[in-house]
Image (tube, rainbow, N blue to C red):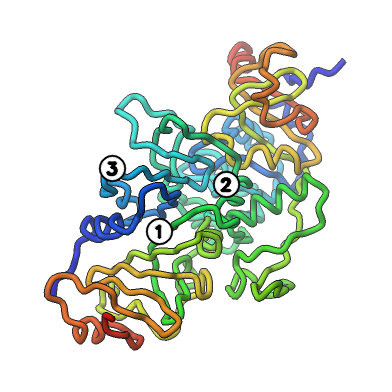
Amino acid sequence: MIDKRVNSFKDAVADIPDGAVIMIGGFGSSGIPLKLIEALRQHGATGLTIISNNAGVAEEGIASLLRDGLVSKIVCSFPRSAGSIWFEKRFEEGSVELELVPQGTLSERIRIAGAGIGGFLTPTGYGTRLAEGKETRVINGKGYVLELPLPADYALVRAECGDPWGNLVYNTAGRNFNPMMASAARVTIAEVNSIVEVGGLNPEHVVTPGIFVDRLVAEEVDHAQV
Amino acid sequence: MLRFNPEQMAERVAQDIPDGAYVNLGIGIPTKVSNYVAGDKQVIYHSENGILAVGPAPAPGEENPNLINAGKQYVTLLPGGCYFDNAESFAIMRGGHLDIAVLGAFQVSATGDLANWATNNDKFPPAVGGAMDLAVGARKLFVVMRHTTRENEPKILEQCTYPLTGTGVVQRIFTDLAVIDVTPDGLRVVELFGENTFEEVQALTGARLLPPA
């Protein structure tokens, strides 16, 4: 019997070790698994590598992991936003390494990691500083950069609704990086607003097939425990 | 000299957005362009985080915290619009499916190189977002920017001095003084605002300009 539901956010992240590579879904303030991130912060694993589009703002989400000194490296496209004070502080003091990746290259590297592809050639970044040291190739007169897959140990993703098999549907632009990340990690943990029974999701609407998801936690379950 | 303000610059760019175009607008002045596209044109706006047919800002109290644009502002979806994941969104951008992208810039070179993601200050953490993908992928790349820096230094140069976003990618530059095309012959002024003269604009440009044809 397959039932991927976990009782609490705390239990969902309990086995994440120091030094783990963790993908975190979200774009700006949208589609971020904030409760899983808070559970990860309380769990306290250190030396984490975080793969995410942004680096968090104010005291919330990834910014809280940076504030607490749990992050040693961040892989993202746009770490600096209004209010990204903790990223800027850790970057300036040199305690966090930054790997800056153009956004489309970031999502494609994650996608191919989940799809079993060994690399891809993209025109993005060709002739720029972000292609320095990378293999390049000219095809039909156009320059391309070889980019490699970006897998992770864990993915923390946010969806609107799931079922016990881990099938996920999203809310509007909250989808963003979550589907690719769900496919690209050894263990994928999904935070959802609600869980319906198996068969309760319209199969035409499922965006992330449950095979990519290992654990599922709903906000309402956690609220019930409090 | 007549210097357009950001609203006038956005209004001028909007005149060059044709009916039926699929368009991506960057953060800043580019975002304002949609306010000035004439109502009889149907233009579909793409947002890099995964939206086609982005609509106007929601009424107060109607915001969906998930429904934001690339500038992290609350938006709505027009009827006929749709959502997709980030990899598909960048397939749209990189794959040449967008008709026009409008971006801001620090510098543009005489051959259409674009510099808009980093300065030479290494203490300042860089951020690139989707700029490099848009630069290589959109069928037409419009840049809208002030003609000079706040210190009156030219931003249109023979060679960019800031790190590049893409090489040979810009087709048309809209500044606060003029409209300039990047052509195989060089930078050609196609429009001077108000009574601005070619010589005045050339004096504020760090690359040789060609006069209006």
Query: In the rendered image, is residue A134 in sight?
Result: yes
Vertical position of residue A82 compared to residue B131: above or below: above
Kind of residue sitting beneath label 3: Asp
What subunit carries mark 3? B
Dot 3: within a 10 Å radius of its alpha carbon, few (fewer than 14), some, or many (20 or more) residues? few
Residue B25 x %, y %: 40, 52
Q: Earlier in the sequence, mark 1 or mark 3?
A: 3
Q: Residue A198 or B190: which is nearer the viewer? A: B190
Q: Is residue A19 left or right of residue B43?
A: right
How far apart are the alpha carbons under marks 3 and 2?
27 Å
Q: Secondary structure at mark 2?
A: helix
Residue A172 x %, y %: 52, 31
Residue A70 x %, y %: 64, 47
Q: Nearer the viewer, mark 3 or mark 2?
A: 3
Dot 2: within a 10 Å radius of its alpha carbon, few (fewer than 14), some, or many (20 or more) residues? many
Quarter containing the N terminus of chain A? top right
Label 2 belongs to which residue?
B89
Question: Could you tell me which residue is drawn at 50 percent across and 40 percent down?
Answer: B51
Query: In the rendered image, is residue A47 in sight?
Result: no
Question: Could you tell me which residue is drawn at 60 percent across and 15 percent down?
Answer: A220
Residue A183 x %, y %: 75, 39
What subunit carries mark 1? B
What subunit carries mark 2? B
Label 1 belongs to which residue?
B102
As drawn, the label of residue B40 is 3
Residue A120 falls in which quadrant of the image? bottom right
Q: Secondary structure at mark 3?
A: loop
Residue B40 falls in which quadrant of the image? top left
Q: Residue B187 or A136: which is nearer the viewer? A: B187
How far apart are the alpha carbons under marks 1 and 3?
20 Å
Vertical position of residue A154 compared to residue B109: above or below: above
Kind of residue sitting beneath label 2: Ser
